[in-house]
Image (cartoon, rainbow, N blue to C red):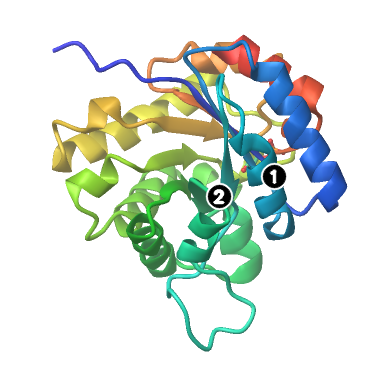
């Protein structure tokens, strides 16, 4: 059976960067830069404070819309959870996606696999598409534990998610040692893990795995994206540093799609 075509998907994860004005300006420049592209999904993930304004700026775009993602959410819909933001609140301000389980959240804020699962299910209930991040540390890679770690994170994150809901998820493989370090995984290293992720998903959902999009993240840049995208199971990128300037992000989307 030939695999289903998978539309390339690029998400700029702006992390903790940008004033309101800067975020709206960057989103506008990205939108203008990709306006003529077809056959690729482009998403930006500003800070919570800029989500509404960025979504408003982007919503009127008729040709080739740029989507909006949040960088995290809480798993409860409402209640006494000071400082948290719910998935339904994100949907309410115009988000279509939410990045979950990013390694910075896991490493710096103690996020656990079980919490990522709760958040993914909350996001799906709210109508958002979760972008679920998995990836090993350098110590885990050096110890030969890459695939085991990725499998544990993946299977925990999608536990009790129905096949119909899984079809709305994206998976992002982000080796921790490649994030913000300038050290990209080689295309071969990325492909090995992406193929593994697809195979694990296929074991549970044979009809679905060929159409799920698996993104690579970790020092993706305009000059390395083409080689990564040439790998059969690499369907797009989750991009940090190179997404903070419209020129480099747009060039990367063009190179990669
Ligand atoms: P860099 O592209 O800056 O390495 O960040 C990757 C990342 O963490 C995207 O979520």
Q: Nearer the viewer, residue 204 or 9?
A: 9
Q: Are marks 1 and 2 in contact (CB under 8 Å)?
A: yes
* Residue 221 appears in the picture as rendered: no
Q: Is residue 111 above or below residue 180?
A: below
Q: Quadrant of the rendered structure where residue 5 is?
A: top left
Secondary structure state at the residue bearing disc 1? helix
Residue depicted at x 76% and y 54%: 16
Q: Residue 247: x percent and y percent?
A: 80, 20
Quadrant that contains the C terminus = top right
Ligand 1 quadrant assignment: top right
- Return the residue at label 1: 54
- Return the residue at label 2: 94
Residue depicted at x 25% and y 39%: 200
* Residue 203 appears in the picture as rendered: yes
Residue depicted at x 66% and y 65%: 108
Q: Residue 11: x percent and y percent?
A: 59, 34
Q: Is residue 84 above or below residue 127?
A: below
Q: Is residue 42 above or below residue 7?
A: below
Q: Residue 10: x percent and y percent?
A: 56, 28
Q: Quadrant of the rendered structure where residue 166 is?
A: top left
Q: In the visual, does 108 lie left or right of 235?
A: right
Q: Residue 113: x percent and y percent?
A: 41, 64
Secondary structure state at the residue bearing disc 2? loop
């Amino acid at each position: 059976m030939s695999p289903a075509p998978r539309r390339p998907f690029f998400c700029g994860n702006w992390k903790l960067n940008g004033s309101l004005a800067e975020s709206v300006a960057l989103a506008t420049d990205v939108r203008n830069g990709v306006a003529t592209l077809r056959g690729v999904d482009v998403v930006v993930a500003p800070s919570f404070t800029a989500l509404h304004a960025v979504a408003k700026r982007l919503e009127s775009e008729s040709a080739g819309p740029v989507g909006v993602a949040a960088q995290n959410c809480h798993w409860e819909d409402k209640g006494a959870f000071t400082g948290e933001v719910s998935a339904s609140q994100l949907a309410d301000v115009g988000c279509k996606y939410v990045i979950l389980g990013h390694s910075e959240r896991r490493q710096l804020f103690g996020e656990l696999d079980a919490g990522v699962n709760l958040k993914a299910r909350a996001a799906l209930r709210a109508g958002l598409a979760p972008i679920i991040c998995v990836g090993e540390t350098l110590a885990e890679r050096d110890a030969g534990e890459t695939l085991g770690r990725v499998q544990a994170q993946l299977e925990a994150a999608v536990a009790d998610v129905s096949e119909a809901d899984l079809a709305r998820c994206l998976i992002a493989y982000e080796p921790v040692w490649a994030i913000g370090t300038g050290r990209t995984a080689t295309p071969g290293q990325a492909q090995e893990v992406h193929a593994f992720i697809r195979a694990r998903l296929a074991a549970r959902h044979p009809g679905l795995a060929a159409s799920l999009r698996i993104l690579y993240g970790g020092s993706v840049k305009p000059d390395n994206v083409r080689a990564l995208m040439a790998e059969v199971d690499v369907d797009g990128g989750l991009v940090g540093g190179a997404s903070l300037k419209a020129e480099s992000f747009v060039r990367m989307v063009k190179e990669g799609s």
